[in-house]
Amino acid sequence: MTQTPPSFGRPFQAALVLAFLAAGSLARAQDEDEPDDAVQVQQRAMQVNVWTDENFDQWIYNGRDITGIRGRLASLLILQIEDVERTCGLTEDQKKKLQLAGQGDVKHFFDRVAEKKRRFQLVKNDQNKIGQIFQEIQPLQTALATGPFDHGSIFYKTILKTLDPPQAAKYTRSLREKTAFRYRAKVELVIANLDESIGLRADQRKKLVALITEETRPPKRYGQYDYYIVMLQASRLPESALKPIFTDTQWKVMQRQMAQVVRLEPFLKSNGFVPEDEPTDRPPADAGENAFPNGVKAFPKN
Amino acid sequence: MNRIQHIAFSFGILGASPMIAPAQDQKVAVPAAEKVEAKKIDGKPAVRKAVIAVPAAKVMVQPELRGRVLGGVRAIAVPAAKVMVQPANPNVAVAVDGADANLAPMIAQFTQQYRPVLASELQFVRVVCEPTKEQRKEIAREGEAAFTDAMKTLAAAQLRGRVGNRIVFLGAVAPAQAVGAAAANTEPRYLIQSGLAAAMRKHLSAEQLARYQVEIDKRNADRKELTVHNLVSILDQHLVLTAVQRDQLCDAMLQNWSENWLGTMEILSYNQQYFPTIPDKVIAPILNKTQKKIWDGTQKISGGANFNGFQMRQMIQFGDEPALVGDDDKDDAPEVAAPVQEKKAQPKKE
């Protein structure tokens, strides 16, 4: 069961605002010469509570037609297969398997969109539920942007089953580099945010980035709570490793910030963001617990 | 203005700041942004709390966030279409002259909102320059006055709709050199740093200032790098880059740096439907044919304008940080020792 997110979810709001911007829906709903009366105004606002199927399609497809969407997903699938082939080489048979698997994911994507649309149609006039729907479709938006071929996909599972050990080793190395790059970038961003708050010298930032990158693991899944996940894991590091990096004053603030983040832990855990409590030499990241049949970890330590 | 309002206003959704509402503890129906503008010059001097009904704005209410802050677009109905304006701290008063009287509520709001930035910047000076107690005291005292001026500038710019254009690349010691079009920059942290810079130049030694400038330069360089790293990471999610391509793209973007990228980075981190705007000459030579096709077919955004990048996050996530200065600062300027403590009205500055 998931918990209510913390109240300071700016990134979600930012995404929301951006999504609406992209939908081109911005306009002023009232003429200047209309009466300046709060009651009338609110009543009028209630009357225009109309969401349409077009709104839903706009949210998901961002103004593109279905042919264009299918073309985009086909291109994304080609990209994925090219990447695997470039990394470890593929036989024609392996390529076909991956192609089929990817097509299955594309079909599954459209099935999910159809299901969400049905749910949307049931609640589209209910202002209280529409926000929830919007939240639920965000994974679909992401899937459309980057392709529905992530770690839970048929495509990914097929890779795990199809590659032979030498191929798996090469592919693993490539994924590992990619994961490390992404997580380091995220940690750098977190430390920059911390710097804005407590004023860190360059050498302090460098030590913190190195320590956190080395001793913590990527979120199980990335998203709007990345900052908190990194800080939560930092809070678990031994004080003997962390404290010497800060001045006394900075450390006081850091401690308080970490204490605040720790209070979010139940929420972050229950919503599947936090890496499991495992040694850092276990596979991190949103790759899940997948591993190649030969025992090669999909995501060994960075 | 809280974080979500800030974003909404940054993108022009609500058109005008609700903080200009000239009423105390009352609801103001605002049929259009223009009328908000009209009300703000009514001349009511003080705002403690205002709740503005925004009929024009359609507000998307996340259930958990209902009753907090809402941005809006037309097509959405808002039964509770209110923008809750964060109440100004009634004990925060900023002396303004007659011409600025209408800005007072906004100045008070900004003063409260951005005081942690002042505290963190003073802390940065302390960590880097290791000033003596006397130096700290003078910088804090003059920095406070500069901070007040900065908040006035910010409020005035807000009314003109020109608040902050990007995250600042710091140049407090030599702002014109470091920032370029410094005069037009109303980004809050930049304004605060610029104000502090004058005090620092007055009270710190050349060696201390040099040390500070070195750190500022490193900070800027780090920010460029991390921005590029994060954007390339985002692109990697879309384009499935190779390790070599990632490196090439990092190099190319650093060589063709655009400050707008700072503003787009965070929002792109949470909304993967968009790409940052990167000139084709930078990225195209690095991509293969399939990647180029995806790149060409994806919507780009060129944020940065009116989006404050990093700096909003910490203040809202963690609020004020009274511990930013050490115990031995308690006899420094009181507002620095306790940056979020209530502050009485100060005499008008001549």
Image: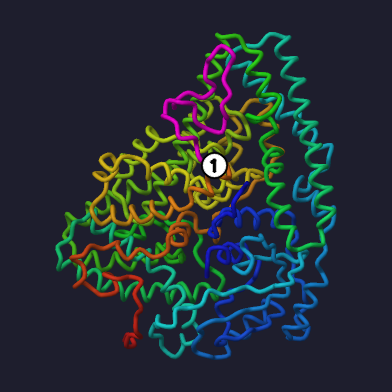
Q: In the rendered view, would you say B191 is above or below B22? A: above
Residue in the picture at 42% in, 55% down: A260
- Rate crowding at label 1 as few (under 14), some (14 to 19) or many (20 or more) other CA atoms within 10 Å: many
Q: Tell me if residue B220 comes above or below residue B125 in the rendering.
A: above
Residue denoted by label 1: A273
User: According to the image, what is the colour scheme of the structure?
Assistant: rainbow
- Report the label total: 1
Q: Quadrant of residue A150?
A: top right
Where are the magenta residues, as a range?
A273-302
Residue B1 in the image: state x and y as whole percent: 52, 70
Q: Secondary structure at mark 1?
A: loop
On screen, residue A233 versus residue A298, left or right, reads: left
Q: Is residue B286 magenta?
A: no
Q: Specify whether residue A281 is painted magenta.
A: yes
Chain letter of mark 1 equals A
Q: Is residue A98 above or below residue A205?
A: above
> What's the magenta bit mostly, secondary-structure-wise?
loop
Q: Residue at x 33, y 41 (%)?
A: A208
Q: Is residue A246 left or right of residue B15?
A: left
In front: B181, or A20?
A: A20
Give the percent coordinates (x, y) of residue A64: 79, 44
**Residue B175 screen position, x and y as percent:** 35, 60
Instruction: Decide if residue B272 is on the left or right side of residue B247.
Output: right
**Left or right, residue B292 beside residue A233:** right
Position of residue B119 measured from the top left corner of the image (x, y, whole percent)? 32, 64
Name the amino acid, label 1. Phe
For the C terminus of chain B, which image quadrant?
bottom left
Residue A29: quadrant of the picture: bottom right
